[in-house]
Amino acid sequence: MKKMILILALVAIVKSATGQADGGWFGVKEISRGVYRIDDHGSVNVYLVVGRDSALVIDTGMGSADLASCIRKLTDKPLIVVNTHGHPDHTGANYQFKKAYIHPADIKEALASNNPENRKLAAQNMQRGEVPSESDLFKGVPQNTVLAPIREGYIFQLGGRKLKVIETPGHTPGEIVLLDAENKLLFTGDNDNTLVWLFLPVCRPLHEYLASLQKLQGMLKDFTTILPGHGIPRSSDFINDQVNCVKGILNGSIEIRPYNSFAGDASMATWGQASVAFDPKNL
């Protein structure tokens, strides 16, 4: 239970204050051609990428409301679902779909996160007790969702559009990002939020996270826009701030200050627009 509370605390810290575009539980905005950002009641971003033949659902949010019906208002094409990592705010509505792809290192985490008890706990902690209206509740049949493993280099083919899986361990062992190189978009889960938590029990050491950031830094020619799990889109050069922040922590050249939250105490550093909260014992 302590582990789950720590994970759930993440979204409470980075929860955005954006309103809901349609007055319902979800806010929907087309942010690029065929790409929709679905704001799960200010808690987390779900993305829908529509191709010619099928559509890709990137993360499933909290699972409190009927995400599947929201998506069906946007497209009637066959759906492919992928989780960027196993935390409950990114796998919460998996039960509304028959299958979801995820890195094998995070399958156990996703299975633990996605059950009715944890969805209820998530709603209490991340959405401050707010619950969907009756019209927003999931009315379908809960699925026994199959979690299918994916690894580096896997390509989702949507018809006229493809997204490539890139492994970026750090926030979790199985964190992935998805590159749409043709359209210069990078969908990053919790790898590139303004504040990234690296002090939870499942987090990899800070030097491994730096390697993931430098991997993306070496690919900056392939994308111009970052679409994070929390917050608004940002320019690709944000990754440079993240790299400098983590380097500064590791070489002792950056100011470190205490970071206190109800999820526990940690240390934090900031460089430019990027902040990292980390465990000094897990460098």
Image (tube, rainbow, N blue to C red):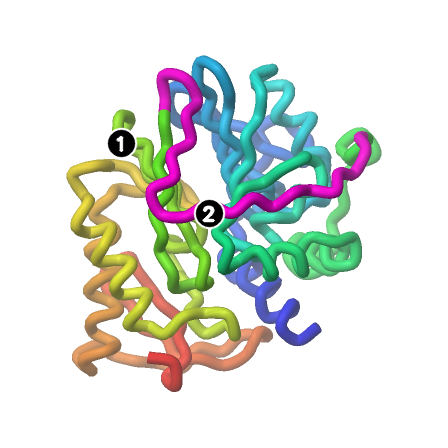
Q: Which residue is mark 1?
A: 181
Residue farthest to the bottom, as pictured? 281
Residue found 33% across the figure and 72% down from its top: 206
Q: Is residue 233 visible?
A: no
Q: What residue type is disc 1 on? A: Ala
Residue 197, given in percent of the width and then of the height, sits at 44, 66
Task: Give the magenta range.
Answer: 140-161
Residue 163, given in percent of the width and then of the height, sits at 37, 32
| Quarter of the rendering containing residue 191 | bottom left
Q: What residue type is disc 2 on? A: Gly
| Mark nearer the viewer, 1 or 2 | 1
Residue found 38% across the figure and 39% down from its top: 154
Magenta stretch, main secondary structure, is: loop
Q: Which residue is mark 2?
A: 229
Q: Is residue 208 visible?
A: yes
**As drawn, is 267 to the left or to the right of 56?**
left
